[in-house]
Image (cartoon, grey):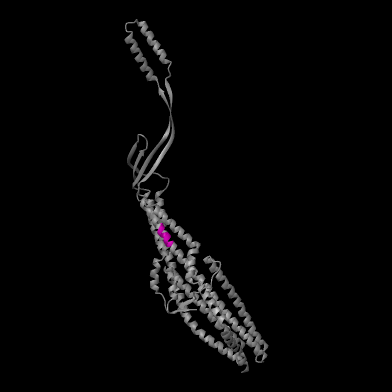
């Protein structure tokens, strides 16, 4: 009995200290209370972490920028069917080289002169007219047979040209549809990226809470083992136990201390990983606890139905539509193009023309039939990829749903085991103090209680990961916080 009374002495000392501080140190308690309130205000909830993630994540910002680029690209193509009007100006210098033949001119000139001489000197002797004709021929023969001419001209010719497509074989409509679908795909990609980032945040956030729970459990176990060691020293001094029995407690305590240091290191690593993910130099104490819903469970069929409308599924469906439009775009290259054209010069004496132009490419150096065949194969690949991803999603969801259900069942068993382990530790401790128990019994009981606490935290973490995975693949990751507010949520 003396050993038992001595064993309870620390409890009696704590009561005296509490009374002393309650009466003599009340102002310090008030100050401590204010500090605790301020600390609570500084706690970092999961919602706070999500807000920080949205503003600091490079991946989300990059996806948002790509989405905005796709939207602008789609908007830029909405007026492709409008007339294209251009203002043109040609500054030019022109030189033309030509050779003018003079044979006909010389013959015509000779005939004209001879006719004139015959008419004027018709009564002259024949010898005189012949001499005149010969003189004319001799003079004209001295002239060259041709004359080289160089013409040079320079200036500026402005004009306005207008072209309006009338028929393009589907080129314009397919181009616009592809741009619009790319914008929609970018939107779904952004939503998927945000959902995936939130899923990753949940994993890191609650990993910190898990490591904290494991650290606290090991710390409590270490404190309990230290208390056992202290009591063992007293029992050894009083002759109730041997030195070897006391050293067994020390060995057990050292083992727990090693585990505690290991969990401390893992806790610090998890905090660092979360801080890097959020782009923060440090993280305030987290306020959203580990929890598990003991009763509520989403309907499996409803989850499967919702998974068909997730951003990932919508993006894959858009890929199939894009493949269809790509086929139409390739087919348009085999069809003629018709456009209305007009031109008006801006000179002092303007020229203009207006009409309809038809273009059909006979040869492009590209096998258009093979391009169309390639587009059909791309559509087939998009469909098969969609089916494969759907199978992967269904398998992942089925696994996550099974883990969630198992975690709920395991939690109920762990709660029962926790009560039994606490009672067993109490019995083993009393038995050892009275000389009926062993050191191993006390250590095993303490380890069993610590193990159950650790398994409870780990089981809750698995539940949360399974729940978040299901919500991610059903496009409802934002509903995660609602499960914490349910009546059956057991917070650790």
Query: In this view, which residue lies farthest toward the bottom?
Result: 1
Question: Is residue 310 at all visible to an observer of this figure?
Answer: yes
Taking the image as shown, residue 471 lies to the left or right of residue 35, namely left
- Decide: is 222 above or below 50: below
Work out which residue is located at the far top of the displayed protein and give it: 125
Q: Quadrant of the N terminus?
A: bottom right
Give percent across and percent down for residue 429. 58, 89
Total marks placed: 0
* The quadrant where residue 346 appears: top left
Asked if 64 appears above or below 33 in the picture, the reply is: above
Q: Which residues are magenta?
A: 182-189
**Which secondary structure dominates the residues rendered in magenta?**
helix
Asked if the stretch drawn in magenta spans residue 188, the answer is: yes
At 48% across and 61% down in the image, what residue appears?
A: 61
Membership of 339 in magenta stretch: no
In front: 135, or 289? 289
Residue 361 shows up from this direction: no
Q: Quadrant of residue 187?
A: bottom left
Residue 325 is situated, as x and y percent measured from the top left of the image, at: 38, 55
Identify whether 365 is placed above or below 34. above
Q: Between 53 and 348, which is closer to the camera in this rendering?
A: 348
Compared to residue 456, the image places residue 200 above or below, namely: above
Q: Position of residue 265 (x, y in %)?
A: 59, 73
Residue 181 screen position, x and y as percent: 39, 57
């Amino acid at each position: 009995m003396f050993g038992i009374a001595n064993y309870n002495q620390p409890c009696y000392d704590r009561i005296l200290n509490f009374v002393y501080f309650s009466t003599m140190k009340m102002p310090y308690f008030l100050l401590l209370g204010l500090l605790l309130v301020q600390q609570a205000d500084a706690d970092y909830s999961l919602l706070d972490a999500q807000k920080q993630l949205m503003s600091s994540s490079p991946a989300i910002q990059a996806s948002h920028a790509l989405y905005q680029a796709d939207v602008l690209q789609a908007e830029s193509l909405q007026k492709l069917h409008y007339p294209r009007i251009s203002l043109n100006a040609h500054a030019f210098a022109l030189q033309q080289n030509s050779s003018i033949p003079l044979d006909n001119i010389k013959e015509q000139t000779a005939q004209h002169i001879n006719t004139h001489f015959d008419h004027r000197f018709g009564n002259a002797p024949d010898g005189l007219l012949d001499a005149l004709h010969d003189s004319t021929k001799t003079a004209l023969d001295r002239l060259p047979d041709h004359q080289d001419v160089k013409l040079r001209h320079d200036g500026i010719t402005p004009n306005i040209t207008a072209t309006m497509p009338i028929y393009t074989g589907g080129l314009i409509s397919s181009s616009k549809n592809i741009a619009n679908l790319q914008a929609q795909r970018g939107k779904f990609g952004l939503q998927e990226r945000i959902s995936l980032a939130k899923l990753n945040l949940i994993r890191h956030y609650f990993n910190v809470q898990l490591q904290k729970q494991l650290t606290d459990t090991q710390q409590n176990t270490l404190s309990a083992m230290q208390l056992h060691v202290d009591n063992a020293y007293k029992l050894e001094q009083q002759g109730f136990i041997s030195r070897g029995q006391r050293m067994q407690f020390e060995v057990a305590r050292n083992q727990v201390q090693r585990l505690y240091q290991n969990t401390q290191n893992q806790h610090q690593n998890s905090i660092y990983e979360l801080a890097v993910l959020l782009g923060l130099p440090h993280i305030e104490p987290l306020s959203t606890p580990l929890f598990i819903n003991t009763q509520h469970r989403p309907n499996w069929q409803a989850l499967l139905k919702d998974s068909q409308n997730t951003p990932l599924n919508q993006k894959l469906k858009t890929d199939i539509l894009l493949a269809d439009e790509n086929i139409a775009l390739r087919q348009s290259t085999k069809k003629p193009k018709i456009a209305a054209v007009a031109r008006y010069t801006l000179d002092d004496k303007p020229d203009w023309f207006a009409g309809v132009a038809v273009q059909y490419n006979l040869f492009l150096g590209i096998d258009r039939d093979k391009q169309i065949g390639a587009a059909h194969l791309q559509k087939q690949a998009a469909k098969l990829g969609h089916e494969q991803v759907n199978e992967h999603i269904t398998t992942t969801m089925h696994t996550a749903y099974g883990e969630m259900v198992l975690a709920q069942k395991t939690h109920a068993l762990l709660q029962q085991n926790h009560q039994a382990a606490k009672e067993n530790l109490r019995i083993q401790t009393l038995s050892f103090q009275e000389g009926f128990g062993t050191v191993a019994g006390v250590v095993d009981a303490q380890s069993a209680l610590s193990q159950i606490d650790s398994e409870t935290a780990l089981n809750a973490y698995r539940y949360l990961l399974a729940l978040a995975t299901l919500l991610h693949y059903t496009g409802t990751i934002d509903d995660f916080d609602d499960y914490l507010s349910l009546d059956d949520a057991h917070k650790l």
